[in-house]
Every structure is written in structure tokens, then in C-alpha cells.
């Protein structure tokens, strides 16, 4: 999975959230869409970029009570825990 425009990632969101580019472009948001679609309640992702832009909206994109843990690989190859997001589902239609 990679960051790129994927309009289907916002298909099950409330209309106002579909207009936010973050919901279709960012890796973490696309993973949240997969979690919604496949009824996944706990997932982890390793990315080479720190989450930027989706930090504030990600809990709203995740199903209520679900968890997405993000790890970041730094330029020196070190992997570190970035944050665990807990879903509240507010953006889901």
C-alpha cells in the first residue's frame, strides 16, 4: 500500500469528509478505509514518512474503538513507534 490518490478510500465516509484530500491520498487514511471495509479492529503499519496532515482526522476515519499503530522508519533505518490512534468513527456514514 502506498500514498496516492484513491477515491474509493472515502466512499463510505460522510459527504463533508469525502472532500478532504487526506482521506483519499494518505497511506494511513487508506489503511483506515481497509480496516472499515474488512472489519479490522487492530492494525499496525510501518511507513517511511511521519504522518502529516492526517494526524487530526485519522481517529475520525477509524471505526469506533479500533486501533491503528503507526511506526516510522527514520533515515538511519531505525524504526520507532510514532503513535497509536484510537478510532471514534465520527467521519463514517
Image: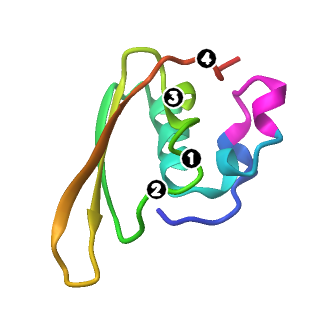
Q: Secondary structure at mark 3?
A: helix
Disc 4 crowd, CA 10 A, few/some/many (<14, 14-19, 20+): some
Q: Secondary structure at mark 2?
A: loop
- Residue at horizontal 51 percent and vertical 66 percent from the top: 2
Residue 65 as seen in the image, left or right of residue 21: left
| Residue 23, horizontal then vertical, whole percent | 66, 44
Q: Are marks 2 and 1 in contact (CB under 8 Å)?
A: yes
- Residue at horizontal 55 percent and vertical 48 percent from the top: 30
Query: Sequence order check: which comes first, mark 1 or mark 3?
Result: 3
Q: Which residue is mark 3?
A: 36
Magenta residues (range): 10-18
Q: Are marks 4 and 1 in contact (CB under 8 Å)?
A: no
| Residue 43, horizontal then vertical, whole percent | 30, 39
Query: Sequence order check: which comes first, mark 4 or mark 1?
Result: 1
Query: Sequence order check: which comes first, mark 4 or mark 3?
Result: 3
Tell me the CA gap for discs 2 and 3: 19 Å
Residue 70 as seen in the image, left or right of residue 22: left
Nearest the viewer among 2 and 79 is 79
Q: Are marks 1 and 3 in contact (CB under 8 Å)?
A: no
Q: Are marks 4 and 3 in contact (CB under 8 Å)?
A: no
Residue 6's quadrant in the figure?
bottom right
In the image, which disc is placed on residue 90?
4
71 above or below 89? below
Which corner quadrant holds the C terminus? Answer: top right
Query: Sequence order check: which comes first, mark 2 or mark 3?
Result: 3
In the image, which disc is placed on residue 54?
1
Q: Are marks 2 and 3 in contact (CB under 8 Å)?
A: no
Q: Nearer the viewer, mark 2 or mark 4?
A: 2
Amino acid at each position: 500500500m502506498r500514498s496516492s490518490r484513491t477515491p474509493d478510500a472515502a466512499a463510505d465516509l460522510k459527504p463533508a469528509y469525502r472532500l478532504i484530500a487526506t482521506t483519499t491520498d494518505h497511506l494511513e487514511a487508506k489503511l483506515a478505509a481497509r480496516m472499515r471495509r474488512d472489519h479490522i479492529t487492530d492494525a499496525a503499519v510501518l511507513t517511511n514518512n511521519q504522518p502529516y496532515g492526517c494526524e487530526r482526522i485519522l481517529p475520525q476515519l477509524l471505526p469506533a474503538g479500533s486501533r491503528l499503530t503507526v511506526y516510522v522508519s527514520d533515515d538511519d533505518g531505525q524504526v520507532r513507534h510514532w503513535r497509536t490512534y484510537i478510532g471514534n468513527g465520527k467521519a463514517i456514514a
